[in-house]
Image: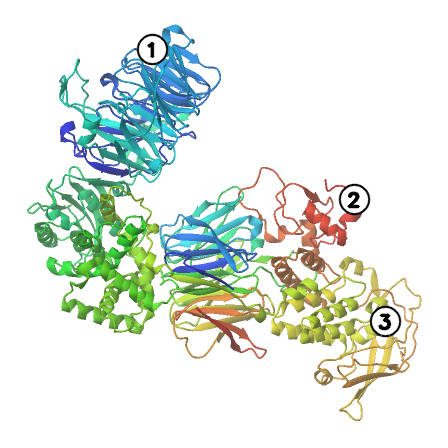
Amino acid sequence: MVTINNAHSELIHDAVLDYYGKRLATCSSDHTVKIFEVEGETHKLVDTLQGHEGPVWQVDWAHPKFGVILASCSYDGKVLIWKEVNGRWSQIAAHEVHSASVNSIQWAPHEYGPLLLAASSDGKVSVVEFKENGTTSPIIIDAHSIGANTACWAPATLQQQSNQGTSGSASPQQVRRFVTGGADNLVKIWKYNSDAATYLLEHTLEGHSDWVRDVAWSPTVLSRSYLASVSQDRTCIIWTQDSKEDTWKKTLLKEDKFPDVLWRASWSLSGNILALSCGDNTVTLWKENLEGKWEPAGQVTE
Amino acid sequence: MSEYVGEGPYSSPTFGKSLSLRVDGGFNAVSINPSGRDVVLASRKGLYVVDLDDPFSEPRWLHHLTSWEVADVQWCPHPAKHHWVISTSNQKAIVWNLSRSSSKAVEHVLHGHFRAITDINFHPLQPEILATSSIDTYALAWDMRSPKKPYFRTSNWRSGAAQVKWNHKNSNVLATSHSNIVYVWDVRKGTSPLSVLEGHSGSVNSIDFNPFNETEIMSSGNDGTVKFWDYNKVEDELQMTITTEFPVWRGRYLPFGDGYCIMPMIGGNNSVYLANSFHDSGNSESRTTKLQPTYVFKGHTDRVTDFLWRSRHSQNTIIDDREFQLVTWSKDCDLRLWPVPDMVYDKVHYECGKELPEKLPDYDYDTFRSEPENNIVDPRYTNIEIPKETFVTKSGLRQWKADNNIDQLQWISGVRMHNEDSPHDLFEEVSLNNLGEEVTSVGHKFPRIVFEKISVSTGELIITLNGPWVEEDPEKYIFMRIIINFPPNYPMKGNEPAFKIEENRELKEHQKTQIMERLREISKKYVDANRYCLEPCLQYLLGEEVNLDISDMEDDNKIFSFDFEDVTSLDRSSLGSSDDHSDAPTEISSVSDVEFAVGDGSLQLYSSTPEPKFDSTPVPNGCGAVWTAQGTLVCFFRAENKTEKKQHAIINVGRTGIGGFVRSKNVQSASQTLKDNVSGKQRKPKTYREALSINSQHASESLNQSSDSDSDDSDDSYAEFLDDILKNDLTLRTRMPMMPRIFRDETKSTTSVSGKTTDSNKKSKSSIVVQDFKSLIPDKKELAEQYILFRETPEFVAKYNAGIAESYGYEDIAQCWRMISNVLIGRGDNDFYNYDWDQHSLGGKLLVKRLFEYFEKCQNLQMLAMMSCIFATLGRPDQKTNYKLVPPTLSENIITFYNNEYEPSPHVHSTHGSFYSNDTGTQNARMRYGTNQASLNDGSSIISDDYFHQNHHANGNKNGKSHNNMNNGYVETEATIPDIKIKLIHDDVLDLAYQGLEPSLVDPKCETKFRQYRTQYAEILYIWGLPMDRAELLKFNVNLNTEPEYLHGIEQDSGLDIYKGVSNRWIESNHGHTQQNCSYCGLKAGRLVFVCGNCQHVTHRTCAEKWWKIGDECPSGCSCDCIKNFDVSEPLI
């Protein structure tokens, strides 16, 4: 177990380990992003990335096939892309299309290429693609009227063949989806439409009575897709969709409310363990049992 | 347009004062107008001309984009050509005429060098002559009257020239420095040097002739020495050596007195050192002394790039009454003006008022900052960019404001002036030192207000804003333009500014009068208290309440400010000084001014639209947990250390001294209600903005609590935590007013990086914990490391894996593997009987289906993926087409289950049939009456299923009839499950035409799903660092069940096409190199790769070596036989 104290002079808002679990990126209200090397029980501060002009809310590592690349988003409305080359970190790109705080960022599944999803308090969600020729072509959609708090990609899956006819020669298509949550208490699912060259609303999920703070799409693609949404209303809803059906089924994680606002939801890469962080400074783990009920699987407190 | 018009050097508002100007943009060189009015800064983007007398006005920007660092810029020192500035651009030198409009300011381009120019020097006596030096080893002298080519050229042929300087007295003599040698030349003598001064052990960075003695020259270099020479002495040129502890970048004689000034290249506290040059004159023995600076100009936080002397003197006089001011430019982006203390003049024996042999040159005290207006612009030039040589200048009078996109507000915020002579009067209360600082701080607080014009020097301000001044509808906003004129003595009592609201259709006349009335009232009130009034006035214009009870307000301020004060004081101490906190109370009020702005809904950051918008940024999270790919959980929590918190608060009070206890009763009670509010759930803030305001209230509250220490801290940790997150933001926003105070502390300057504010007492804001939760995740790395996929038979594989699972104690998994291995028994042997059994309702097919279902429920991807491999048969589905259904043969088995619990044992009569059969193969299959083993873990549940006869293949079952009886094929069950015994009673040997290909145990329709399992598990394997296993696993993606569409997709273009043309590469691609990823380790494959000529898959050389030892197919899983097609042992080179 690694414990890092005194990392930042202000509150930390996100901490993410990279693909190999060797490097930890943290971001904080002190406007900086810090990179730690984690080896066993020890850790070492490698670099402090300065460039944001406001508190930094989230960081996300890109897939290693693109290089050692980190994205960070901040209250200053910017998304900065950082890259490490020979041990030196530098800012290689900035994504500035939002007019208010960017609350959440996530790299797309690596199969799609270097695509970044960002949700902002200006109500918009943007997908920016860092193309080979150095250009970016952001797709900006109006997602949530008051503000988009969070956005999360669906795992890369191949589209199910709608009919079993084997005569069709069309190659399987990659379906790009993501889910967003916002201050209009809604969870929305968006799907890429290649004709419109943008993301179109596929489903609107109603269920929360207050701001949606985070949504997470489970990376496990088994017979069902799982979504978890957490909200200011102190509830967590698990949304499931059977692969053959189109509708999303709503299940409250637990009937009674959590002691405080729920901040973050995170699925394990496999095994569908859900980690929820709550305003009372605790993290709880949840697991679905064989009967389909969600039961606590552990708790972490400071 | 009223610009500041200086009346002369003696009315300069900045001379003799310290001033700091922050100029961002990578400026590298600096020079000063001989009149001392303007400074020119040069960078790759062009020149900035800054008027030192009106630092609040943004500079003039002469655009000149170049990719070369500007090595030097020089302002012509002659009154006749005081509009000339020369700058370098690699091997060229550009002569700018600042009296021309910016678009055509380039007067000459001097092109004589082959490589980058290092130094330029105007001739001190002849205005038209200058010299340049370059790393091409040449030094050239130019005459501006014929600038096409130099009139003099010299070189030492060996090393590049770093410096060139003209002699101040002898107009034919110049000196250059090459590496560690200084050469003195006479232009009349060509390339034979007048003198060669050797002695430095490192490169000479700077040379300078003594302005008073013709033959004396000083040189300073990387060896950390400054040497004084007299080249008139034949043998003994070196007069004196000064040693320093740093390499010297610049060293020059003082323009006054008998001294010199040096500046380090690195280290040396980033200071400029001034020393007199006669201190050891009496002692001729030791000619080497250590540097004994008379005065040190210290304060820059990065290395100083250059220093200049700004001087002024009376016009038309022969009395030397010159005064000086040091100007420094540093890498920390601060342009600084330093007053020279009188004692310096004394120390260097500079006598003011001495009679001079000749008159000092007089300069026009003009600024070139503003675009020359009298210049009639040729209409041809306004739209066209004139190409000048190979560089581009773009700038234009026409769109001067728009082109000159220097944000004035930002510019002003970088100006910090400190008036040392200012009497400590009532001004002390307000730490805003001037209107500029006020505008800056206000401008940053009200981002919605647009400052159209800021003229600090003339006190004119034009702002536009949207105010809620529609009578009928308070929600509606009116666009207003307001002109404010500040009297020069503002904010002294009675000097309130004059407001003027521009005519506006929407604004009713009476309302306008009312607004004006109220503005006057507010401004008068504030100014009468010697306070700056802009902020409350703007607040009022934006429709907010303004508190006119200033004394009340002060109380509030004090309370709000303690936390900030703490931050700043700690900040100071962390900077290394523990000195005075005595002036703290005076500073408080200014910082707390910020409080006014907090909480008004208008603070929309970066809002481009003037409409008020709700900032919906939610309250940031203070804790969180993120899963890693490895199955660990990274958690971070905000630290909740209440005792520490309390201590901290007490320290606060201690630090701020007695001030902390000056609190009125009513404030205390007020904060009490605040606290109640905060703890109430409804008041819990949702947005960052709300949180900000609540927090600042809380700041006062926490102080309250700390004084009566027995009362427990608020149970509401929320507010406490907000306190933590938001303080930072408040410091950010109070940054501007804080600056002047910090600057007052001359010795340590601060950069404006606000994020640096550290609060050492509360360092531990958050803690990060990485916890291992692998046990919760069904996929086990240790199993993956040991599992195998390829062996002689799948059965063996399953059995082996069962052993692995067992050895790690996963009994259930081991059991499953055993079951699988039993199902798979003999499949490799082409034993038709087993296939027969597979098709049975109770047979392998059902078992397999159930297993998949079970593991789906358990979310055990590992098992799902392993199973989807083990039940798949490698190969390509098109091979399947060679096989046809032959007229089926029907076999009939009677199976008896002996179950301990069931008596009598159930008899099952089943009919089987329809095998695939090779149409050519008619030879008898080898029949075996082997024993069949079946171990059923959950026997009852399987048995409980239907026992009906099944015809799996409907076509033509009825015709072909043949009995397949088995002779007492006794089935031994595994010892672990003794419950079920299966006895095959009836058996008939059949001439079954069968070969090789068995029907799959899994439904081919599920292949898509299986592929997903495999792909996903492959990803996990990769993360676990098992690329070999991943590659093996992926091979199964092409099996007998693979849909032709998928294969098609693969074959068409190695996988890229399914992603619809999205390239998987990062933006920086090396020109034309293969940028594919290694199909083995997945990382980028650059050089040293193996490319299969057939499937085009790329593998690192080392990866390929590893892979081909074990594998025989392409590691990408495309089922290409790379080895067969290419000899992989060789082409790896």
Disc 3 from disc 1: Cα separation:
113 Å
Element marked by disc 3: helix
Residue on which the image places disc 2: B1127
Q: Nearer the viewer, residue B56 or B975?
A: B975
* Numbered tag placed on residue B232 in the rendering: 1
Mark 3 vs mark 1: give the one in front: 1
Q: Chain of mark 2?
A: B
Q: Residues within 10 Å of mark 3 (few under 14, many from 20)?
A: many
Q: Is residue A213 left or right of residue B555?
A: right
Element marked by disc 2: loop
Q: Earlier in the sequence, mark 3 or mark 2?
A: 3
Which quadrant of the rendered structure holds the C terminus of chain B? top right
Q: Residue A286: x, y in percent?
A: 51, 73
Q: Residue B10: x, y in percent?
A: 14, 28
Q: Chain of mark 3?
A: B
Contact check, label 1 and label 2, Cβ < 8 Å: no
Mark 1 belongs to which amino acid? Answer: Asn
Q: Is residue B95 left or right of residue B354?
A: right
